[in-house]
Image (cartoon, rainbow, N blue to C red):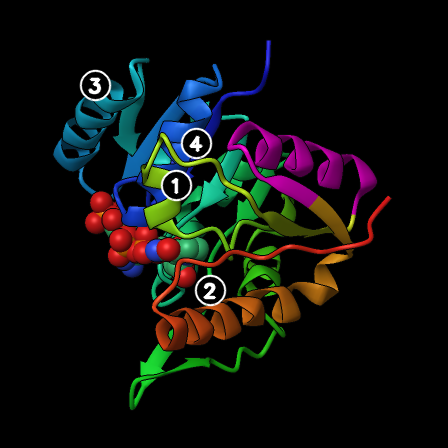
C-alpha cells in the first residue's frame, strides 16, 4: 500500500491540483487547512472532481496522519505554522513546493532567505524530518486540467537517495517526469526556476513547463 499524502495548504490552487492528480493515481490524499470547515468543503469538491475520495482535515491532523507531507502554502507564515507540527512530522518525508516569490513592479522576484531557500528554512524548522523540494515549476492551472497531459519535467532535490526516489515516484503519479537534480542545498536554484518560468509565460502568454533534454 502506498503512503498516504497530506498536503499542508491543500485548499490553495497548487494543493488542489496536486490532490486531484494523486487521488486519481490511487493515492490516499488528505488536504489540510487552518480551518476545518474549509478543509472539509475542499475535500468534498475535490472528491467530486477526481471521482475518488479525498479527505480533509486541519493541518495538524494532516501532519499526524499522513506518511508523506507536501507543503503548498506561501512562504510567509509557513515556519510559524510548521512549529507546532514538528513532532508529528518527525521521521517523515516533507516535500516543499514553496516558492518564496513575489511580484515587484510586475516582475517576479525571489525573496532572500537566511537558510538559503524556503526548503532549507523548512529543514531547519523540522530538524527531525527528511526534507526534499520539488514541483515548483508545475503550474496549478495545468494540474487542475485533468484532461491535460503534463508534458514536463520536475527537478527534485533531497539529501537522501531514497527520499529523491520517493519524490520521483510522486512526480510520475501526477503525470510529470521527476529528474533527480542533487542535494537540498540546490533548492534555491530550483525555487528560482519558477521566476524564469513565470516571466517567460507572461511574455509569451503561455503555460510552459520545463523540459531537460539529453537525459538517459
Ligand atoms: N499556483 C501555482 O501555480 C504554483 C506552482 C508551483 C508552486 N506553487 C507554490 O505553492 C504555494 C501555494 O501557492 P498557491 O498558488 O496554491 O497559493 P494559494 O492559492 O494562495 O493557496 C495557499 C494555501 O495556503 C494556506 N495558507 C495561506 N497562508 C498560510 C499560513 N500563513 N499558514 C498556513 N497556511 C497558509 C491557505 O490555506 P487555508 O487558508 O485553508 O489554511 C491557502 O489555501 C506557494 O509557495 C507557491 O509558490 C504555486
Q: Quadrant of the N terminus?
A: top right
Mark closer to the chain start, 4 or 3: 4
Ligand 1 image position (quadrant): bottom left
* Mark 4, other Cα within 10 Å: few <14 / some 14–19 / many ≥20: many
Image-based side of 195 in relation to 187, left or right? left
* Residue that carries the numbered disc 3 in the rendered image: 48
Extreme residue in the bottom direction: 105
As helix, strand or loop, the secondary structure at mark 2 comes to: loop
For the residues carrying marks 4 and 3, which lies nearer the camera in this image? 3
- Beta carbon of the mark 2 residue lies under 8 A of ligand 1: yes
Using the image, determine if residue 128 lies above or below residue 106.
above
Q: Where is residue 45 in the image (x, y as percent from the top left)?
A: 18, 26
Q: Earlier in the sequence, mark 4 or mark 2?
A: 4
Q: Is residue 69 left or right of residue 62?
A: right
Residue 212 quadrant? bottom right
Between 175 and 92, which is closer to the camera in this rendering? Answer: 175
- Observer-nearest residue: 101 or 198? 198
Q: What's the mark number on residue 6?
A: 4
Does any portion of residue 59 appear in the rendered image? no
Q: Give the distance between the C-alpha atoms of the residues marked 4 and 2, in whole angstroms.
A: 19 Å
Amino acid at each position: 500500500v502506498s503512503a498516504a499524502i497530506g498536503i499542508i495548504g491543500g485548499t490553495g490552487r497548487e494543493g488542489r491540483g496536486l490532490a486531484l492528480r494523486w487521488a486519481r493515481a490511487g493515492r490516499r490524499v488528505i488536504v489540510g487547512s487552518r480551518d476545518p470547515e474549509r478543509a472539509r468543503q475542499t475535500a468534498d469538491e475535490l472528491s467530486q472532481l477526481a471521482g475518488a475520495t479525498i479527505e480533509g482535515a486541519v493541518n495538524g491532523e494532516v501532519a499526524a496522519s499522513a506518511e508523506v507531507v507536501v507543503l503548498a502554502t506561501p512562504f510567509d507564515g509557513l515556519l510559524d505554522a510548521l512549529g507546532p507540527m514538528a513532532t508529528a512530522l518527525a521521521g517523515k518525508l516533507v516535500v516543499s513546493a514553496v516558492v518564496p516569490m513575489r511580484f515587484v513592479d510586475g516582475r517576479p522576484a525571489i525573496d532572500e532567505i537566511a537558510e538559503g531557500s524556503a526548503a532549507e528554512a523548512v529543514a531547519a524548522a523540522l530538524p527531525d524530518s527528511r526534507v526534499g523540494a520539488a514541483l515548483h515549476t508545475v503550474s496549478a492551472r495545468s494540474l487542475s486540467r485533468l484532461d491535460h497531459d503534463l508534458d514536463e519535467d520536475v527537478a527534485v532535490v533531497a539529501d537522501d537517495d531514497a527520499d529523491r526516489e520517493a519524490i520521483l515516484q510522486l512526480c510520475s503519479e501526477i503525470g510529470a517526469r521527476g529528474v533527480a537534480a542533487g542535494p537540498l542545498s540546490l533548492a534555491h536554484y530550483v525555487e528560482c526556476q519558477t521566476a524564469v518560468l513565470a516571466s517567460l509565460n507572461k511574455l509569451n502568454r503561455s503555460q510552459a513547463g520545463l523540459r531537460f533534454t539529453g537525459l538517459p
